[in-house]
Image (cartoon, grey):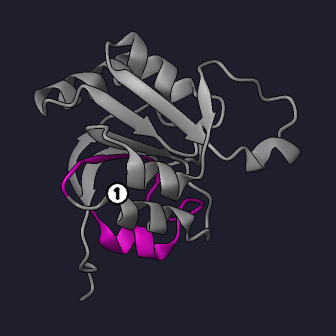
Amino acid sequence: CKTWISKLAAELGNRSCKTGLEVMAGSGLLSKALSECGIEMTATDNFSWETQHKRMFLVYPVEKLDAVEAAQNSPADFMVISWPPYGDETIFEVCKAWGSKRPIVYIGENGGCNAPDDFFDHFREEHKIEIPQWLGIHVHCWIGRYNERSKSG
């Protein structure tokens, strides 16, 4: 297990999370890493990125499935969202479909080039995992929950 991934897996284990759903999984790299730490992962993606990233190849089995549908129907204990597209409301719809009872792992910037404002207005951080930083990129790994009430209201 990689250092920060093992910390994430340990924190999920402390929350009795044994199964996870990764939406918009791309190549499935995070699901692969978490599965190597003993968490049973299901990775999904609609593969809309294929036209832009023709060289990307799968490193873990990724089921072709719409993210909202995956969130609505998954029995997983937690959901992983990593670097959702900026300005695309899909991730907010995914979180609404997932609901507030099960945790969400969010990996990406806090605003900036990730997710729309609606996502951040309704995501409540509960725990932060320290993650390696890159020059000019302020990446975070939070475990939190969707909240129907926005932070501003």
* Nearer-the-camera pick, 34 or 61: 61
The N terminus appears in which quarter of the rendering? top left
> Compared with residue 27, is residue 60 higher up or lower down, i.e. above or below?
above
> Compared with residue 130, is residue 113 higher up or lower down, i.e. above or below?
below
Q: Is residue 108 magenta?
A: yes
Q: Which three-letter amino acid code belongs to the residue tagged 1?
A: Trp
Residue at the spot 28% in from the left edge and 24% down from the top edge: 9
Number of marks in the image?
A: 1
Residue extent of the magenta highlight: 101-124
| Residue 125, visible in the rendered structure | yes
Q: Position of residue 99 (x, y in %)?
A: 28, 61
Q: Position of residue 11 (x, y in %)?
A: 19, 29
Name the residue that disc number 1 marks: 98
Q: Is residue 128 magenta?
A: no
> Compared with residue 135, is residue 99 higher up or lower down, i.e. above or below?
below
Report the side of 46 relative to 79 (left or right). Answer: right
Residue at the spot 61% in from the left edge and 71% down from the top edge: 87
